[in-house]
Amino acid sequence: MQPDHGGRLRIVLIDDHTLLREVMRGALDMEPDMTVVGDAATGAAGILYCKTEQPDVVLLDVNIPDWSVTETVPTIRSISPNARILIVSMHDDPVLVRQMLDSGVRGYLNKSVSRTDLVSSIRAVCADDIRIVLHVSAEALTHIASASNSPETLTKRELEILTLVSKAMSNRQISRRLAIAEGTVKRHLGTIFTKLGARSRLDAVNKAISIGLITRVG
């Protein structure tokens, strides 16, 4: 992707922490080849910026109030197909990182990343159509590499079921809602527990919410 006519990369920030957005905006606007064209505290506002501004890069937190990251990423890719999405999060749970990479993000950066590494990551994904950048813990990186051939991420159906579980729906209610057998729901839940390392329905829901796979109800 080439920069805009002013020679600068256009960036949208989506993060519910106001101070962090202001610091990131200030840092990026100081770069001669970058400009922040929008910053948003909610998924809805961020989606609107992506639709109207058609940015080169979107810096996205996984924990935003109104949208789950599993909804936000495909929506951004749909309405702003040329945008490079970089996740910037305090969480680098291996399941979440794999989920995001599989969904098409171009990078995953822990919020402990330096300004220099953030800027270089933005430039890297814009200069190379296939490059992916990772700044995560050694533990997360090792887990991702060792599990590269295994189905660690939650499928669309598993996310649907977990979302309904978060709404306090029983297996029978879920089976009726999704028009599948109750036994199928149980099997999906067993797989979800294994992938998330969860011991119970509540534990699975809490873990999924904490890493942004689903949004909190209410």
Image (cartoon, rainbow, N blue to C red):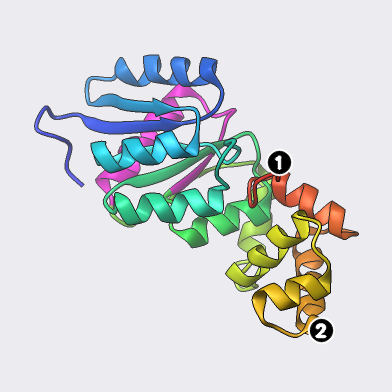
Q: Position of residue 105 (x, y in %)?
A: 44, 52
Considering every residue shown, the one lying at the far left of the view is: 5
Q: Which residue is mark 1?
A: 218
Q: Which mark is residue 183?
A: 2
Q: Position of residue 96 (x, y in %)?
A: 63, 52
Closer to the camera in the image, 144 or 24? 24
41 over 149 or under it: above or below: above
Residue 99, located in which quarter of the rendered image? bottom right
Residue sitting at x 81%, y 57%:
168
**The residue tagged with tag 2: helix, strand or loop?**
helix
Q: Position of residue 15 (x, y in %)?
A: 51, 30
Residue at figure coordinates x 30%, y 15% from the top left: 30
Where's residue 204, x and y in %?
80, 56
Vertical placement of residue 103 versus 114, above or below: below
Q: Which residues are magenta?
A: 107-128
Q: Amino acid at mark 2?
A: Gly
Q: Is residue 8 magenta?
A: no
